[in-house]
Structures are given as C-alpha cells and as structure tokens.
C-alpha cells in the first residue's frame, strides 16, 4: 500500500471525470479515508449515501460527524416508498432471511435501485472496496468498467490496502468512524443484516451471516471489467 499512489489515482480520476464523478459513502472506514483524501485533492467532489431505512443509529451519527468535520455535502438516496410498502405488506419485515432470492429482492429495492438513480448522470464512481474483504472481491482492480451501470468507470482506490493500513490512516488523521467497529463489527450495512465478527472470521462474515460466503453481495458490485489507465 502506498498512500501517494492512491492519491495520484484519485487526482487522475478527478481530473478525468469531474464534475461527473462521486464517492459512494457507506461510512465505512474505507469510505471515510477516501472522503478525507478527496477533500485534500479536490474541491466539491460529490459524495452520496444510500439510506435503506434500516441503518444503525451509529451510522447516522458517524455521517453527521463526518459531514461537519470535513465540511462536505452528502446527498442521500432513499428506496421508493411504494416498493418498500408492497414488499413488507406482501412478504413481512424479515422475509429477506427466508432465502437468497428474497434477500436479493430486499437489497434491490433498498440499495440497487437507489444506487442506479445516484449514478444515472455520472461518468465514474468511487468505492471503498478492498480485495482483502472477502472471496467475492479477491479479483478487484483499482479501475474497472461497471457493466451493471451502463459501462461507467468504477474506481476502487483502496483495492490493495490492508485493514491495518486503513486504520492507520484513520488514526493518523484523527478521523471519526462508526462506533460499531469498537463492538466487533468489521463490515456494516443494514442493522438486521449485520452482526459483529467472531475471532478468525473474514471481515464480511457478519454480513448476511446465514448465507454462504460466495453469496455475500447485495448487487451493488457486480459486472465489472478491468480498465487500463496511465494514472500511475
């Protein structure tokens, strides 16, 4: 991991795509790291978040503190009310635990569709994904073409960072973070689908813990192809 290389990649991305580029922020330590780097390397870069309606209170608290500390604007996207109402009235509030298919329906309504709206007018988006996080991300590249969203460019500047690298950056720069990390959480999503990680488990073991590892994605991060750049 080289911080300078990561910053160079972000500088290239901003120069290439601004103002049609944005950071998708879930208030993970990775996203907070990138948000901080962006404030040091660019002005007025878009930051957006998905409010699924089932986030932990600690996530909202972190979002509020981060917004004030970095002086950034966060654009929130919400699921469509009528789709949530129909799903919960027809299937119940915990239907997502009954099958992978049912869980994917919930993720599509609460995450995938709002994300599609957030990306609809962009040429590129930035994520905090890392290869180390899970078996579903071990082939992640720093720059990819996002086939799921019309072929826009997807930039994963922390792809080769380790967990300890991210925490070192957070502490060195005195950045806020979600307090659920202090309770053993390592990957934080919707409250009913997230728990603390047990010793020896991979980082995303606390997400949808009732499913097999190879199924642990919500549909936001699929369909990508590597793109070669001369940013480094």
Image: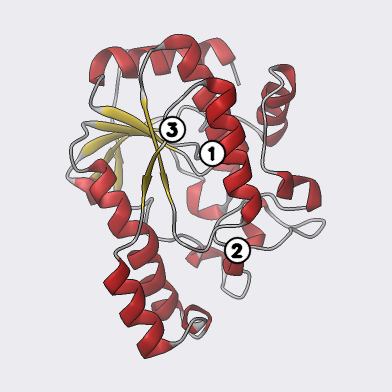
Please give the name of the residue rendered at 32% of the width and 17% of the height, measured from the top-left corner. 14
User: Of the residues under marks 1 and 3, which one precedes in the sequence?
Assistant: 1
81 or 225, which lies in front? 81
Which image quadrant is residue 41 in?
Answer: top left
On the picture, is 117 further left or further right than 99?
left
Residue 113 visible in rendering: yes
Q: Is residue 208 visible?
A: no
**Left or right side of 125 for 179:** right
The residue tagged with tag 2: helix, strand or loop? helix
- Give the alpha-carbon distance from disc 1 to disc 3, as whole Å: 7 Å
Q: CA distance from mark 2 to mark 1?
A: 22 Å
Of residues 135 and 53, which is closer to you in this image? 53
**Mark 3: which secondary structure?**
loop
The residue at the far bottom in this view is: 90
Earlier in the chain: of badge 2 and badge 3, it is: 3
Q: Quadrant of the C terminus?
A: top left
- Circles 2 and 1: CB atoms closer than 8 Å: no
**Residue under the point 51% across and 45% down:** 138
The vertical placement of 135 against 128, above or below, is: below
Question: Which mark sits nearer the N-terminus, 2 or 1?
Answer: 1
Give the residue pinned by disc 2: 191
Q: Nearer the viewer, mark 2 or mark 3?
A: 2
Image mark count? 3
Say if 12 sits above or below 141 in the image.
above
Q: Nearer the viewer, residue 144 or 28?
A: 28
| Residue at the image position 73 percent from the left and 17 percent from the top | 172
Q: Which residue is mark 1?
A: 130
Residue 213, image x, y percentages:
57, 65
Q: Which residue is mark 3?
A: 156
Q: Secondary structure at mark 1?
A: loop
């Amino acid at each position: 991991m080289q911080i300078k290389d990561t910053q160079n990649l972000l500088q290239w991305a901003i120069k290439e795509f601004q103002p049609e580029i944005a950071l998708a922020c879930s208030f993970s330590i990775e996203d907070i790291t990138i948000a901080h780097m962006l404030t040091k390397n660019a002005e007025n870069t878009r930051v957006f978040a998905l409010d699924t309606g089932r986030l932990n209170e600690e996530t909202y608290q972190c979002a509020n503190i981060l917004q004030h500390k970095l002086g950034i604007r966060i654009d929130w996207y919400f699921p469509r009310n009528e789709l949530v109402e129909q799903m919960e009235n027809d299937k119940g509030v915990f239907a997502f635990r009954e099958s992978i298919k049912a869980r994917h329906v919930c993720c599509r309504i609460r995450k995938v569709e709002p994300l599609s709206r957030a990306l609809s007018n962009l040429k590129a988006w930035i994520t905090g994904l890392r290869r180390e996080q899970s078996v579903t991300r071990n082939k992640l590249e720093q720059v990819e073409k996002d086939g799921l969203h019309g072929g826009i460019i997807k930039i994963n500047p922390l792809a080769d960072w380790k967990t300890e690298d991210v925490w070192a950056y957070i502490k060195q720069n005195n950045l806020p973070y979600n307090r659920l990390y202090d309770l053993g959480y390592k990957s934080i999503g919707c409250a009913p689908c997230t728990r603390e990680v047990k010793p020896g488990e991979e980082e995303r073991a606390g997400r949808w813990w009732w499913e097999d590892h190879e199924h642990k994605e919500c549909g936001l991060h699929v369909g990508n192809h590597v793109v070669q750049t001369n940013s480094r």
